[in-house]
Amino acid sequence: MTRVTDWLASQGITIPGTPVLIEAGVAFALTVAALSAGWLAGRKLGPVATQFWQKRVGGHAEGLGPRMSDIVRHGLAAMLLAIMAAAWPWHSLSALGIGFADGAAAGMVIAAVLRGLSIPRWAAWTMGLIAFVSILANAIGGFDVIEAILQRVGFDVGKRRFSLYSVLTITVTLIVIFAVVRLANRVTSHTIASARGFDPTQKLLFQKLAGIVILIVAFFIGIDLLDVDLTAFAVFSGALGLAVGFGLQKTVGNLIAGIILLMDRSIKPGDVIVVGDSFGWVNKIGVRAVSVITRDGKEHLIPNENLMTQEVENWSYSDKNVRVRIPVGVAYSSDLKLAQELMLRAATESPRVLDNPKPNVWLAGFGDSSVDHEILAWINDPEGGVGNVRSDVLNRLWNLFKEHGVEIPFPQRDVWVKGLPNSEGGAKPEGGSGGD
């Protein structure tokens, strides 16, 4: 055994002594305990964390909610291992094991969080790998060496140097800021949506304003973290002004128009509107356009500016009650009082027609072939469509007219023939006949 030790020593390989091996055994046991604690916490506290997250974030919990058990498991393990690594000056062998486990746990929790926030898979796992390498290198004292190597590979642009280290730092910072912005948007969006005392339009307005504030704050935090000179934005701001003035004026106009629509509450999600040939209910007011879904299931995207400058028919602006006009004609020989009673009955029996205001029947005029009436019926759910109400009332009226013998006329004309040609090519003198 002594000869083997001496040979390894001659080759520059030192076998750890007994104290180092004992310390490594203790470190291994503590590492296993930390990983076991994380596994137990993920199993016991993971479902609780999932329920809490779903309560706080609502419909956006589909990303992080199912991953809460993994996040708690790896997160607690990484935290315990980090505390353990900092609590004692471990030998390099022990530090290597603790750093490896800590880096792996941290990388897993970072990847899980980023994937839960819908960050692309390559970016999430790249961030996890960077965290693993950084923690492991720091544990064995090699982080400065890696930083120096990355700093040497690069090029200079003026007074600023762009190296692999700076590119890596910028990438990591941007991904982290993007993830934080997405998380903050989800939390604030759900918090505002669940707040009481605001109508849906006010909630949507506050959500959009909160999103803008979050983006502005994230922008300046990113500028500070990346140590960007703000004087460099003097030229950029001028170029941005020209771009807004020429190319982006419609985009900015639509953005401002959308905010104004939400502030004055003239158009709200759920309203039934008519804009040009588009008729439907407002599904969403976006940054650029308003989504209007028609009864055919088609989704029309109408620019916000159009709703500000064109005439818009809002059927549910101050009151959702809408009056439906249904024209009906009956024969001149019909009992008008009976026909009008049947029209009123057909409208009253239709399930979507309101009892208050009551439906009514008006005599509209005397046509060429019929006595024209108009059934006036009220509904309070125009988003359900208007044509189906007319169809239901007319179907009921058709059956009632057949039961009571009320005739629905068709056009009739009298034709008079003043003369017919005879066999010799002449015309038959003054004659006529009438026909129906």
Image (tube, helix red, strand yellow):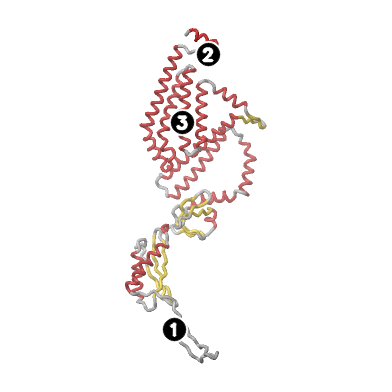
Q: Which residue is mark 3?
A: 108
Dot 1 alpha-carbon crowd within 10 angstroms: few under 14, some 14 to 19, many 20 or more:
few
Can you tell which quarter of the image residue 32 is in?
Answer: top left
Whether residue 266 can be seen here? no
In this view, 184 is above or below 333: above
Mark 1: which secondary structure? loop
Is residue 434 found left or right of 336 in the rendered image?
Answer: right
Q: Which residue is mark 2?
A: 13
Image coords of residue 415 (percent x, y):
47, 83
Callout 2, which amino acid? Ile
Dot 3 alpha-carbon crowd within 10 angstroms: few under 14, some 14 to 19, many 20 or more:
many
Q: Earlier in the sequence, mark 2 or mark 3?
A: 2
In this view, 305 is above or below 101: below
Mark 3: which secondary structure? helix
- Are dots 3 and 1 in contact, CB under 8 Å? no
Q: Residue furthest front?
A: 423
Q: Nearer the viewer, residue 213 or 102?
A: 102
Q: Which residue is mark 1?
A: 435
Residue displayed at 59% across by 27% down: 150
